[in-house]
Amino acid sequence: MSNMTKTLPSKEESALIEQVRHIAEGLAQTFAPFCEVVVHDLRDPGHAVLAIHNNLSSRAAGDPATELGLARIADSAYPQVLANYPNQFPDGRPAKSTSIGIKDADGNYVAALCLNVDLTLFRSMQGILEQFNALGEAPLGESLDPANADGIRRRIDAYAARLASSPQLLKAHERRALMRELKEGGFLEVRRAMEVAASHLGISRATAYNDIK
């Protein structure tokens, strides 16, 4: 049975939508104020917007379903997750949107959870950071970093990435294994290598020397 022919909502559908409402509220609080979070009740396409948090699109509860929502209502095979697609707010601001369809036990769409991120501020920040990071020519190839320091940092970052972690969050036994790798690879033979490694790992030089032992 398709969504278009249903007349009375089931308890299952109501429970699903109630859970989606809670999820939306939590996401909205986490990503406020840059992310609009909208709950759509696809059982009532004429008044589909059930809840809207961090309102960036000037819509209101009771507004009709979007074209995407109508497509889901008409076709249960429509993709359940559409992530990070380009969008635009009514005033022209660029947005990045993600739409997640919620199905009942019969595989029919009953709701949707949509996130719309305002990219305006992030693009402004990106421009500021690019300007700040812009470099001119260095006089006489000057460097304040010891030789091969960047190679040490890259090796540490790669090791942490393999463990789905970051250098500062490595456990003691993981850090000791890393220090052994650095030593065996000859990375610790250059001037101030231990200082560079310790700083990148967020530990003291004494701890770094102990890790090697």
Image (tube, rainbow, N blue to C red):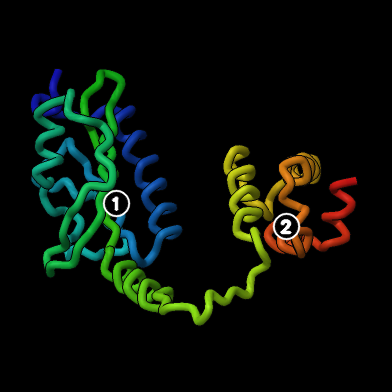
Q: Position of residue 39 (x, y in %)?
A: 27, 47
At a point 25% along the width and 54% down the height, the residue shown is: 96
N-term-proximal mark, 1 vs 2? 1
Outermost residue, bottom direction?
A: 139
Tell me the kind of residue under disc 1: Leu
Q: Could you say which quadrant of the image residue 134 lies in?
A: bottom left
Residue visible at 77% across and 53% down in the picture: 189
**Residue 137 as seen in the image, left or right of residue 115:** right
Residue type at mark 2: give it.
Answer: Ala
Tag 1, which secondary structure? strand
State the separation of the CA atoms marked 1 and 2: 40 Å
Number of disc labels: 2
Q: Which residue is mark 1?
A: 115
Say few, some or many: other residues with alpha carbon within 10 Å of mark 1 (under 14 / 14 to 19 / 20 or more). Answer: many
Circle on res. 154 = none
Nearest the viewer among 25 and 95 is: 95
> Is residue 150 or residue 49 the one in the foreground?
150
Give the residue furthest to the front: 140
Residue matched to label 2: 197
Q: Position of residue 188 (x, y in %)?
A: 76, 53
Query: Quick check: 7 above or below 191?
Result: above
Decide which of 108, 158 is in the foreground and name it: 158
Residue for point 12% across, 46% down: 65
Picture residue at 87% right of the left edge, 54% below the top: 209
Q: Secondary structure at mark 2?
A: helix
Quarter of the view holding residue 152: bottom right
Tell me if mark 2 has few (under 14), some (14-19) or many (20+) residues whose alpha carbon lies within 10 angstroms of its own.
many
Residue depth check, mark 1 versus mark 2: number of the one nearer the observer? 2
Spot occupied by residue 173 in the image (x, y as percentages of width and height): 80, 40
> On the picture, is 60 further left or further right than 208?
left
- Above or below for 154 versus 3: below
